[in-house]
Amino acid sequence: MSTVQISASDVNKLRQQTGAGMMDCKKALIEANGDFEAAIDYLRKKGAKVAASRQDRDSNEGVVIAKTTSDGKKGVIIELNCETDFVAKNADFIAFGESVADVAVSQAPTSLEALKLLEINGVKIADLLLDQTGKIGEKIDVSKYETVEAEKVVAYIHGNYRLGVLVGLTQAVDGADDAGKDVAMQIAAMNPVAIDKADVDARTIERELEIAKEQIRAEGKPEEMVEKIAQGKLNKFYKESTLLNQEFVKDSSKNIAQFLDSVSKGLTVTVFKRVQLGA
């Protein structure tokens, strides 16, 4: 049993350092005989135990945060998950997500695993996730990390941190920020499967054609017409499901390719990423 006297100021100091609850901090200092480093280790170990005991819990709530570098050449999206909407709306939780995204933007890790090994204020993100789990009492984790590089990258967050989009454009011209945001909003709303027809994978095309053919046969059309009608349905799929061919939501007289070309000749999308919370 510790004989060290633990003052309220000591407890408060540890709480400020770790964000853990007052009673948890007091217990940690008692267990560590007043040693702050040992008390922090104690709290982390407690967090690790909580994390291990909650691995079977669903953490489909949280925040999606998209950011770009100051020069607009690179962008990142991270998804930070928790278990409840209550925690997801907490300002401290959102701020933690922002800090993870800031590190991702500034240090450009090559993978989610590499991101978790980076540090915030001298502590690895992986350890901070365990600390958050111990402090909050819910499973906390970064589940997605996406990056985009282009001449101009625009980030957009939709629906109170529930969906994030990055759009890579070919030109960093006047109007590119506004145009990129419009395109990002289009992606958020319409969820295209690819940028253009040529970017749709062969398996998706095969599936769409097969579905179309079965529908046509079910309608009793002659077999010699099936292939031609199926190609027509595939073209409709391209128009509805590939970004550049989609009708622009804000101006139905243009598709996205035409809209971008009207902003600047030759302006187009080279890449996009869309991350939806829990999807």
Image (spheres, rainbow, N blue to C red):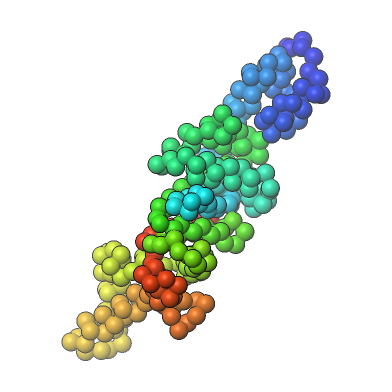
Q: Is residue 275 shown left or right of residue 218?
A: right
Q: Quadrant of the N terminus?
A: top right
At 52% from the left and 40% from the top, the residue drawn is: 103
Along the viewing direction, whichever of 61 and 92 lies nearer the viewer: 92
Question: In the image, residue 119 lies at what x, y percent?
Answer: 53, 33
Q: Nearer the viewer, residue 119 or 113?
A: 119
Q: Residue furthest top?
A: 3
Q: Residue at x 43, y 80 (%)?
A: 254
Residue at 56% from the left image edge and 34% from the top image edge: 120
Residue 18: x and y, percent? 67, 30
- Which one is nearer the viewer's eye here, 174 or 157? 174
Residue 235 x/y as whole percent: 31, 78
Decide which of 31, 180 is in the foreground and name it: 180
Q: Residue at x 46, y 57 (%)?
A: 153
Left/right placement of residue 205 relative to residue 91 reads left
**Which of the 4 quarters of the picture holds residue 17?**
top right
The extreme front residue here reads 174
